[in-house]
Amino acid sequence: MPELPELEVIREFLQENIVGIRISELEIREPLVLRCSAPGLVQDLMGKAFTEIRRRGKFLVFDVAEDAHLVFHLMLAGRFQYCGTGEKPGPGLCLRLGFSSGHDLRYHDRKRMGRIYWVRQSEYSSIPQFSQQGPEAVDPTMDVESFRKRIRRHPGMIKNILTNQRFLAGIGNAYADEILFAAGILPFRKRATLSSAELVRLFEAMKTVLFWAKQELRERMGANIHHEDRGFLKIHGKGGQTCPVCGGLISEVKANRRRTNFCRGCQH
């Protein structure tokens, strides 16, 4: 599932490559992913151009006008592809936007779990989870004290809190593992057991890991925004491999279709 670093790099690429370019074709292959009228969407978008691409948590918002927005929630398997108009479609194609530049933006989703919304500004509340999101995890105005105050409202295991979009928006399963590894904290710790020093480490690790991942992805992704590249991550997805810090084995626990990776030597 794309998380904040991937979505931010995708947003930057799309902002540079499709904003201001007229939509000349719109093909809907899988109406199941739409949470709006398909004919209405075609009528509203044809001949228009996106004015800005924004990210809010795990949502990407394509502004068409000040009060008209195409909102994508990619969920587990949703991916964007930027390619030439004549390129053969890949599997799971749901929506194709053709631009007057001769390029397509395609939305693929093999599992059909993602959702696409066409809304006005006042209708954001109709999008599940959108309006309930907390501040961005990379909000530059959030300092360690405001982080501490916010996290005190959330009981339970620390990994569950990090992936709770009501706490902070944008962090998912993979980067929660990376943040906790960088902070030296086991994912199953209860929030109430964390010391003041550990909360500071957690806050600093969150900022550092998300910035580092975004920089890595900028260099790796380029125009291949449909490829998920997480090979550079230090611990997530690497159960049974060697920890890059202590040399021990990376542990893996699977529960509720979610994989958690951690190092018993580095995280306490």
Image (tube, rainbow, N blue to C red):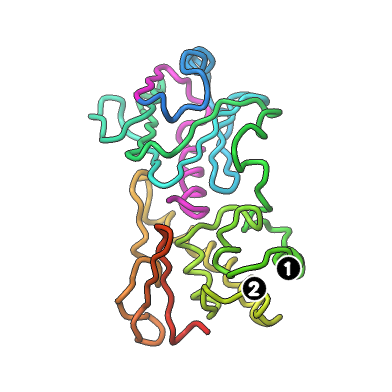
Q: Quadrant of residue 51?
A: top right
Label 2, label 1: how far apart the Cα atoms are = 8 Å
For disc 2, the marked residue is: 191
Residue 54 image point, x, y percent: 58, 40
Residue drawn where x is 53% and y is 40% of the image: 60
Could you say which disc has been placed on residue 224 in the image? none
Give the side of residue 232 with respect to residue 9, left or right. Answer: left
* Magenta span contains residue 13: yes
Point out the stretch of residues depicted in magenta.
1-29
| Residue at image location 30% in from the left, 34% down from the top | 92
The disc labelled 2 sits on which kind of residue? Arg
Q: Amino acid at mark 1?
A: Arg
Query: Dot 1 surroundings within 10 Å: few (below 14), some, or many (20 or more)?
Result: few
Is 188 colored magenta in this rendering?
no
Residue 136 drawn at (x, y percent): 64, 53
Quarter of the rendering containing residue 101: top left
- Residue closest to the eye, 18 or 77: 77
In the current view of this chain or complex, which residue is farthest to the front?
Answer: 256
Query: In the image, residue 15 lies at what x, y percent?
Result: 51, 38
The residue located at (65%, 25%) in the rendering is 120
Residue 187 percent across, percent down from the top left: 52, 73
> Callout 2: few (<14), some (14-19), or many (20+) C-alpha neighbours within 10 Å?
many
How many marks the image carries: the answer is 2
Do the residues bearing badges 2 and 1 touch, measured as CB atoms within 8 Å? yes
Residue at image mark 1: 152
Q: Is residue 224 above or below residue 154?
A: above
Q: Nearer the viewer, residue 200 or 11?
A: 200
* Residue at x-position 46% and y-position 41%: 74
Marks 2 and 1, the one that precedes in the sequence: 1
Dot 1 falls on a residue whose secondary structure is loop
